[in-house]
Image (cartoon, grey):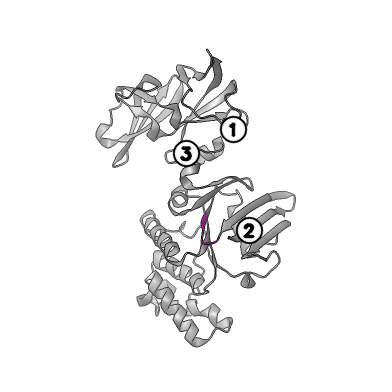
Amino acid sequence: MTSVSVKELSLNFGSVAVLKDLNLDVRDGEFIVLLGPSGCGKSTLLNCIAGLLDVSDGQIFIKGKNVTWEEPKDRGIGMVFQSYALYPQMSVKGNLTFGLKNAGVAKDEIERRIARTAEILQIGPLLDRKPAQLSGGQRQRVAIGRALVRDVDVFLFDEPLSNLDAKLRSELRVEIKRLHQKLANTMIYVTHDQIEAMTLADRIAVMKDGLIQQLGAPQEIYKRPVNRYVAGFIGSPGMNFLEGEVSIRDGQPRFTADAIDIPLARYTFEKAGPRPGPAVFGIRPEHVGLNSGDDWPFAVTAPVEIVEPMGSDTLIWTKIGKQNLTIRVSSERAPAVDDTVTIGFDPMNASLFDAASGARL
């Protein structure tokens, strides 16, 4: 069952098209993450769903009801903003109850919702405090609680963790994941942080220039990105890109470039099959083998230029010909700078893109 449906949605600010004939269906109880860089339209799309922006064209449905021109309060949504937006003069309980009192909710029902929300978010001891007496993480819990007490079907999150430090972001990310598993409500979450997207989402919508480039499960997007943009945006450290061309030799496709000749017999092409011409070969750092006895379809020796320890993992920077390559290995196996290493990989784990369009081949 579809919970939120966006159909051919467009939004223009003057002559600037921010969203362009965008379509998105969110299933009931699904956690969807809108992922992309600043200016890609992800927060704008969320604000359109919330009713905070008037659309230029298209329609928005929530629970089967056309809400395109409904007021935000009538859409059955709860929203958590990037800023906490708490009333500083009110206690935590006052912030949680303010909207309910204005909506005329009965006093005993308000108390029930407050008690339930405080238990879920573990903010019971904070109810009598003012926002100034709370930490950043506690304030964000209260902001989430203010949406939660509305007892709605759809929750919208607009980069709720971006103002927090790394440790607190990690902790609250787990809290939000646990909250979704407990409530099973539909959640649409905006972020530019791919770690948040990969860990939280049932499906990720990767956006660029007001369009959804790819919509799919995190592992699907990670393993089979539809274009070079998605491949480069997902993954930390980013995917390696080697520029060269695809050719057919002795009836078999190959990728060739300076000091590179990779057989592509194990690569799965899209339906169109191999097409000779300029291409980009993408391989993730963790899929590059280092000093292994594996029988790789492609292997070459290369000098180690930079070593970056990252705790349990280490990043190795080297070059094949004139092209940079990053390798991710266990810190226990990390070589030293100026060592010569043997590297190799299997095209089965690679992604190949058309050099001109960036589309997956």
Q: Secondary structure at mark 3?
A: helix
SS for callout 1: loop
Assign the magenta stretch its main secondary structure: loop
Residue 285 position by quadrant: top left
Q: On the picture, is 338 further left or further right than 96?
A: left
Amino acid residing under circle 3? Lys
- Between disc 2 and disc 1, the foreground one is 2
Work out which residue is located at the far bottom of the displayed protein and give it.
107
Chain-order first, disc 3 or disc 1: 3
Residue placed most toward the observer, 192 or 225: 225
Quarter occupied by residue 247: top right
Check if residue 42 falls in the magenta segment.
no
Q: Nearer the viewer, residue 193 or 109?
A: 109
Question: Which label belongs to residue 358?
Answer: 1
Q: Is residue 91 visible?
A: no
Q: Which of the pair 112/3 is nearer the observer?
A: 3
Q: Between residue 46 and residue 205, name the one nearer to us.
A: 205
Relative to 93, say whether 3 is above or below. Answer: above
Q: CA distance from mark 2 to mark 1?
A: 29 Å
Decide which of tag 2 and tag 1 comes sooner along the chain: 2
Q: Residue 91: give its label.
A: none
User: Which range of residues does the magenta coloring cover?
Assistant: 28-32
Q: What residue is rendered at 59% in x and 70% in y? A: 76
- Which residue is denoted by mark 2 in the rendering? 5
Of the residues shown, which amino acid type is indicated by label 1?
A: Gly
Q: Horizontal and vertical percent for residue 54?
A: 70, 62
Q: What's the distance in space between the residues labelled 2 and 3, CA to CA?
A: 27 Å
Label count reads: 3
**Where's the N terminus, which quadrant?**
bottom right
- Place of residue 178 in the rendered image (x, y in percent of width and height, measured from the top left): 40, 62
In the displayed structure image, the side of residue 248 where residue 320 appears, left or right: left
Residue under label 3:
223
